[in-house]
Image: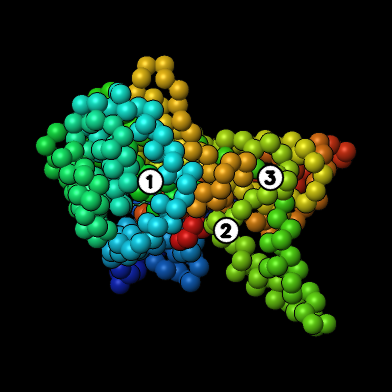
Amino acid sequence: MLEMSESENIHTNSNIITQEFIALEDFNATGAEQLSFTAGDTLLVHEQVCTDWWWAERSGCFGYVPSAFLHRGVEDVEDAWQDEEYFSTYGTLLHLEMLSDRPRTETYRQVIVSNSAALRGKVVMDLGCGTGIISLFCGRLAQPAAVYAVEASSVAEHTEKLVKLNRCEDVVTVFRSRAEDLMLPSKVDVLVSEWMGNCLLFEFMVESVLRVRDRWLKDGGMMWPSSASLSLVPCQAHADYSQKMEFWENLYGLDFSCLQPVAQEEFFSKPKFSHQLDPDDCLSTPCNVISLDMHTLSVSDLEKLSGEFRFTIERSGTLHGFTAWFSTFFHSLDEGGSSLELNTGPHAESTHWKQTLFMLDGPIGVEEGDCVGGAITLQRNPIWRRHMSITIEWRIKRRNDPTFCEEKTKRFPMWR
Ligand SMILES: N=C(N)NCC[C@H]1O[C@@H](n2cnc3c(N)ncnc32)[C@H](O)[C@@H]1O
């Protein structure tokens, strides 16, 4: 890596315009002339030497950087949060899908019912209330002093009517606003929200929940969900592999296999949402790879979350990939009361999220007793703030062949 003094003789070209770029992901230099950086770093590009490599500076150090890892500065991005598109999506009766999700909606109802006594006289905020069903549970199944039903999309117009129709207007007040922009009459005792996206974090509504917690939750107040975890399991996915990959090998007697690399890129380079994992396709006992405490988690923690895993294969089969899902936990307002759990995994009643499948670049036969270790990293997109990439690193060791060790890594954008 070159220091400031050495570099001035190499790239002094007065008509070069230095431009600021943001690093989309980590880059580890593989040569002295390259410059390492971390996702989110700001780099000054002094010369776009060629298409793929630019001459750049970070904190007084210079070197070549891969242009594919960089994006123009955030100020160039019109709408890093894509709020207009995001909230217009939720202004529709997309809420029917969420209301139809019985395990999800019933869990929140159970939380209110089992805490109804402790909620008496409390002030509750329902962040991102949608049609307001959680607020209506509070108004009808408990006796809080007030419920602030906060919703930024146009569905809030309907929420007002639903509050009146269900005779909750004395307790529930609807605020049509981004929660971050709220001015409230008081802090709240309970901040309840159904913020979870695919793979737990997609949409990153969780950032809004944390910012509102820091601004409006009383000291000692309750977050519902109180904690969340991401689980992972090595799995088979014969149907997906057959339908998207083997499909091309013999098409009406014709060989279309030259399209398989295209299919690999098109179907398996990104995660598959709403995957229904058959418990019999789990090759091991699932494990928690990431746990979030909603009372202490900070917004900066969201930039990069990672966890390690170590699976022992419990049944011989084909490792096609890994499947992820989340659980959320709701602590009781009563000291020592039991928590409630919403589990979106393959062994629980199916929810509208189902699970998320990460297909590897080729199936691998595994035997009982083999070991699959590694790590998963959720790297938030420094430009497109509702997006992230999930990188899975794994290594396979075979019980019957101590000389075998295959290590690979794959990065899945969700979606940018
Ligand atoms: N993945 C989810 N659970 N998404 C639920 C999102 C619901 O919360 C609403 N919402 C999301 N972020 C916000 C916010 N910062 N302020 C108010 N409402 C929000 C959104 O309009 C939709 O009704």
Residue that protrudes farthest toward the left in the picture? 185
Dot 3 falls on a residue whose secondary structure is: helix
Circle 1: residue type = Trp
| Image disc number at residue 279 | 3
Q: Where is residue 130 in the image (x, y as percent from the top left)?
A: 31, 52
Q: Can residue 404 be seen in this view?
A: no
Q: Name the residue under label 1.
A: 195
Circle 3: residue type = Pro
Mark 3 or mark 1, which has the lower sequence index? 1
Q: In which quarter of the image is residue 359?
A: bottom right
Residue 412, relative to residue 116: is it above or below? below
Q: Mark 2 points at which residue?
A: 272
Residue 104, relative to residue 154: is it above or below? above
State the CA–CA distance, disc 3 to disc 1: 26 Å
Whether pointer 2 and pointer 1 mark residues with C-beta atoms closer than 8 Å, the reply is no
Relative depth, front residue between 71 and 378:
378
Badge 3: few (under 14), some or many (20 or more) residues near its Cα, within 10 Å? few
Mark 3 or mark 2, which has the lower sequence index? 2
Circle 2: residue type = Lys
Dot 2 falls on a residue whose secondary structure is: strand
Q: Can residue 282 be seen in this view?
A: yes
Q: Is residue 102 left or right of residue 57?
A: right
Badge 2: few (under 14), some or many (20 or more) residues near its Cα, within 10 Å? some
